Amino acid sequence: MWFLLNIVLEFIIYLIVDNITKLILINNRKEIRFDIFVFECMILGFIIGYLSIYHHITYLLIFLLIIHIIGILYTEKRFDLIKNTFKIFIHIFIQIYRSIINCLYNFISKYSINHSSSKPIITKKLPEKCLYTYHLKPTNDLRLQQPSFVQSLSRPGIFNLHGTTCSLNALLQSLASLNSFYSSLQRNINFSRFNYDPIVSTFLDLIFQLRNDHRTTEHKHWNTLLDTSLFISQLNVIYPNLLTKYITTDIGELFQCIIDVMNNALSKQTLGYSTNVTEQVQNRKLTTFSLADLNKIFVEAEAQLYNKITLDNLDAQTSYIIQYIDLTWLLHHIQLGSIIKQMFSGQYLHAYCCNNCSHVRFRAEPFQILTLPVNKTSTTLEKIISQLTKVDIIDSITCSYCSNQIKNDQERKSRVTQQGTLLTTIAPTVSSLVNTHVQPSGQMLFSTPISTPITVTPSTITRNQSKIKCQTMIANFPSILCIQLKRFTYDRHSQTTTKLNTHIFIEPEKILDLSHIHYTTWLGLTNLSITIPSRYRLIAVCLHLSKDLSTLSINRTNSNHGHYVCLYRTDNSRWFLCDDERITEIQQIENVFRTSYVTENCYLLFYERFS
């Protein structure tokens, strides 16, 4: 009897509240309907709570309230609201859960450290076949082994799986040392908003583990090694046999592959241009245009460059050159760029000038690695860079503008002779650089080319032929500059790779200024609306060590291609040598960089922009 009376009472209460709500709705605006319904549900909830505590559990009223809420959400089309609210609660729950797990982990770690011996403990053992099997001593200079010269300090080392993943280990340690790269990952990658490829989270986890160690006060107690087997497996799905137990992958090739993989995984989530892209655009209005508008403007700008620019009117056509560079720079990033590629991307500007008709052609080309040739003469890094804009004169090349008819030139051999300075009427003080040439038959320069180089090949058709001057400049600088020294040549006949152990001297504390190879210097432009970001500071150097320190001749079927280590700088300008599992602090870095250990083996360099 009491149960039936309670049911009737609950139903009457619901009818009273519902009819009062309808009366209020009639006398109010339609815009606040949803707010009134919310207040109605709150009142019903209060009544349910009051009756449940002091009288009885209101089953019918609870059921009617749930049905009423569903009906309101359906009629008011507010299902998205409850969906977002649910997501917020789930996110809060996950954050609380992670905080609890981290606190428990830190507590257990501190407890185990305080009650264990000082001997390092490897918490995760790998199978015997995966253990580190090839280890070249990380020095050929006795001074580096003296106690006064080095001091052992721990940062997470990395397993060298099968003895062939040292290139990945050195590369990860270098990337983790780049502050702007690490900050960009933290700032732009949001796992709560986007669904990323699993390789993204694996890569970030490795970088974050390497970064966090130097920021902790108890880094000397670090006793674990990082395992990269999961990342390697995910990478090999995209690039089969890139990292295997038989061959040590070239670190330059590996870096480019990782950049491409991460770029493809993140490009769909990119919301716009990075600061590095926009700050180098002369006409900032172009950054607001759509892809279709940029393409339309590009067609017009390219037509101006193709048809009108000669040595005589180059000064008058400067605006078209600048616009062409801005457009190619933006188009490259709006179509293919993610935060990863925008950090490392720069842009070349290639200029080709015909000796006969004086027409000048331009071509922009993006790059992620600045490759520099190495010869057998000892030199400095600055001198190698200064050769980037050297002028080449290429003979027996077709020019569509020439009116001079040159007969019987098909049998002439293509030859390269270096002459003077290209376009001396524009910038007579600028030295010219970069040799683009074809090697003797059967040989070519080899050092992991990053993109197809701009080369001009001899024409096989009887047309107008003339001498062409070519010159390369930097049109846009990357936020992080990666330099690869081309120490390797590959002989196709013998299928062997030979390493040049040329001494290249690098000053680790010197700021590298590249303004002299920028195209604005070549054009003689001084009154610019923007400041060219051309100053860099060295952060990491990857070294390639070979068994025979004089030369390295490797057959591609061999199981080993040398060993990689890296020197990297921390936030407080301390330098460390990373050799897989072993991390050593270097105290006298200037002296180390003058030893043959660095000068003969420096291969991949990472510079970060310095303001």
Image (spheres, helix red, strand yellow):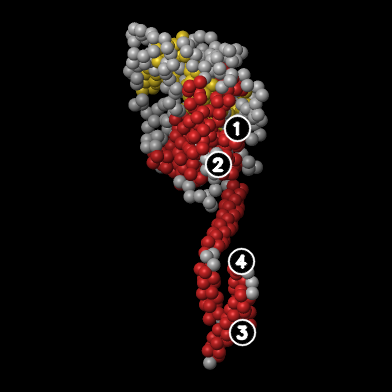
Identify the residue under disc 3.
55
Among the two numbered marks 1 and 4 on one chain, the one whose residue lies closer to the N terminus: 4
Disc 3 + disc 2, Cβ < 8 Å:
no
Among the two numbered marks 1 and 3 on one chain, the one whose residue lies closer to the N terminus: 3
User: Which residue occupies 48% across, 50% down?
Assistant: 195
Label 2 vs label 1, nearer the camera: 1
For this rendering, which residue is in front, 566 or 581? 566
User: Which residue occupies 51% across, 68% down?
Assistant: 74
Among the two numbered marks 3 and 2 on one chain, the one whose residue lies closer to the N terminus: 3
Q: CA distance from mark 4 to mark 3?
A: 37 Å
Among the two numbered marks 2 and 1 on one chain, the one whose residue lies closer to the N terminus: 2
Label 1 vs label 3, nearer the camera: 1
Identify the residue under disc 1.
283
Identify the residue under disc 4.
31
Image quadrant occupied by the C terminus? top right
Identify the residue under disc 2.
272
Residue 595: image quadrant is top right
Residue 186 percent location from the top left of the image: 58, 44
Q: Amino acid at mark 1?
A: Asn
Residue 405 percent location from the top left of the image: 39, 9
Callout 1: SS: loop
